[in-house]
Amino acid sequence: MLRADVAITIAPEVNKFLATPRKMLIDGQWVEAASGRSFAVYDPATGEVIASVPEGDKEDIDRAVRAARTAFDSGPWRKMTTSLRGRLMNKLADLMEQHAEEFAQLESLDNGKPASIARVADVPLAIDMFRYMAGWATKIEGNTIPVSWPGTYFAYILREPVGVVGQIIPWNFPLLMAAWKLGPALATGCTIVLKPAEQTPLSALLLGELIQEAGIPAGVVNIVTGFGKETGAPLAAHPDVDKVAFTGSTEVGKFIVQAAGGNLKKVSLELGGKSPNIVLKDADLDTAVVGAANAIFFNHGQCCCAGSRLYIERGIFDRVVDGVAEQAKQIKLGHGLNPETQMGPLVSDEQLTRVTGYLQSGLSEGARPLCGAQRYGDTGYFVEPTVFVDVKQDMKVVQEEIFGPVVTALPFKDLDEVLTVANDTIYGLGAGIWTKDLSKAHRLAAELHAGTVWINCYNVFDAALPFGGYKQSGWGREMGHEVLENYTEVKAVCIRL
Ligand code: NAI
Ligand code: MG
């Protein structure tokens, strides 16, 4: 493992942003928590405190929901033309572009990811999401329905914004998750209370400043920082919230469903995964090896769709696993703001404990590491990229989401066998296939239980491509026009002629 060790430089605007105690955004005002409390934000590469943000609770959620309700029921947002709504969203995207470097650095300091990755992935994808969704603002249409008595009735569909939306997001792609959530809600005319993850609240707060600067009216987007139980739970349970959208663990997803039951608010969920990545004998193996390494090690394995279960056809097993391990050993770990760094730390002490716990579990169940399988260094929350072989399908490391740079590799004999094991999971988010054989590719794609199937590629995201899960990976889809379903109610209007 190579440690990238050069001094880091932080842009002056970022230093200024960090040095000022942050506030949260409610009804167009930057405010402290009602309780007056705040909490520390850490740089996971050093464990040092870099900022402080308000610690919201039920009282702040109540205030934010009231603001969102007023903005929805009687503010200018729903009355403005959809054209103007789209223009304001495009203005926001332009402002984000002007602040792209600040976002990349903040994301790196807050989450640990390399700024070099945030510059080419998180930030441009987030900007693109607002642009793509801005285009939808003017295109949310209903249709006319030919009811069964021609000439007697005229019927049509209206698609209306669902109302006040609560959005709870995780820490793995803080800005991008905010964009995935806010984009469609804004395009459809909803108003929002957003709760960023407690580990990574900073980029959402900078985004809040730009939302104001873009001219999106007060109360349309409210941002309340705080912890899951104290801030997230009252938002999910709030009787005046019409819909909750959540991305995070499957465990908390189930709490969200229960909390939403009080007023039967609509729910969409994007949850965990344990995605199979399947390499067939006929694949271009050089590409497959690099692809398989990227599938698991991108974002340090902290991706809900990480290709964490590698299934390799017999005959090429050693070549592929050795290749992936070789890739893993080349990865330079270090501070995300060091330009040499290819992989940063895990996001938090808690995740370090969780992931190293899985490493121990794998080792004690007899899995053999080709590389890694331990913490890296004693500062920050680094874990060495790990490839486990000699694993069995029923081991914890094969069944449970690890959310770290840890892949398990198993050989298979034929398509039937690999389909059985690939689908043997409670999750169904992503899947990868590496082959040149069209028939095999299509057969596997059709039979894998997953919301996204990548063939000869992995981790390809686009604002136009729907993303979401089968089984316990979630409800509903993000992105594409599919996501608009999450944020609209359908009204059937029927007129007697
Ligand atoms: P989490 O599911 O606890 O946190 C995600 C978000 O939910 C955060 O904003 C958090 O404050 C909020 N939250 C937590 N408890 C809540 C509650 N009772 N009511 C409402 N909101 C609540 O995830 P955590 O603890 O950060 O990570 C644990 C595991 O979850 C990870 O190891 C990983 O396996 C999985 N995870 C999956 C993600 C995905 O993208 N699908 C993202 C983050 C974590
Ligand atoms: Mg949690």
Image: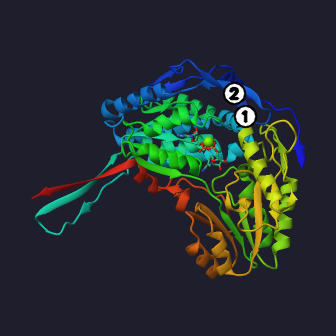
Which structural element holds mark 1? helix
Q: The disc labelled 2 sits on which kind of residue?
A: Val
User: Residue 368: x percent and y percent?
Assistant: 85, 62
Q: Identify the residue at image location x=46%, y=53%.
A: 483
Q: Tag 2, which secondary structure?
A: helix
Q: Residues within 10 Å of mark 1 (few under 14, many from 20)?
A: many
- Looking at the rendered structure, which numbered label has been put on residue 109? 1
Query: On the rendered structure, is 346 left or right of 331?
Result: left
Q: Quadrant of ligand 2?
A: top right
Q: Among all residues in the image, which is located at the extreme top? A: 36
Position of residue 35 in the picture relative to residue 155 (left or right): right
C-alpha span from label 1 to label 2: 10 Å
Q: Which residue is mark 2?
A: 14
Instruction: Please tell me in which quadrant of the rendered image residue 318 appears.
Output: bottom right
The image quarter in which residue 216 lies:
top left
Location of the C terminus (image quadrant):
bottom left
Q: Are marks 1 and 2 in contact (CB under 8 Å)?
A: yes
In this view of the protein, which residue sits in the foreground, 135 or 153? 153
Return the x and y of residue 259 as percentages of the image width and height.
45, 43
The residue drawn where x is 82% and y is 79% is 315
Please, is residue 105 above or below residue 488 in the view? above
Which image quadrant is residue 281 in?
Answer: bottom right
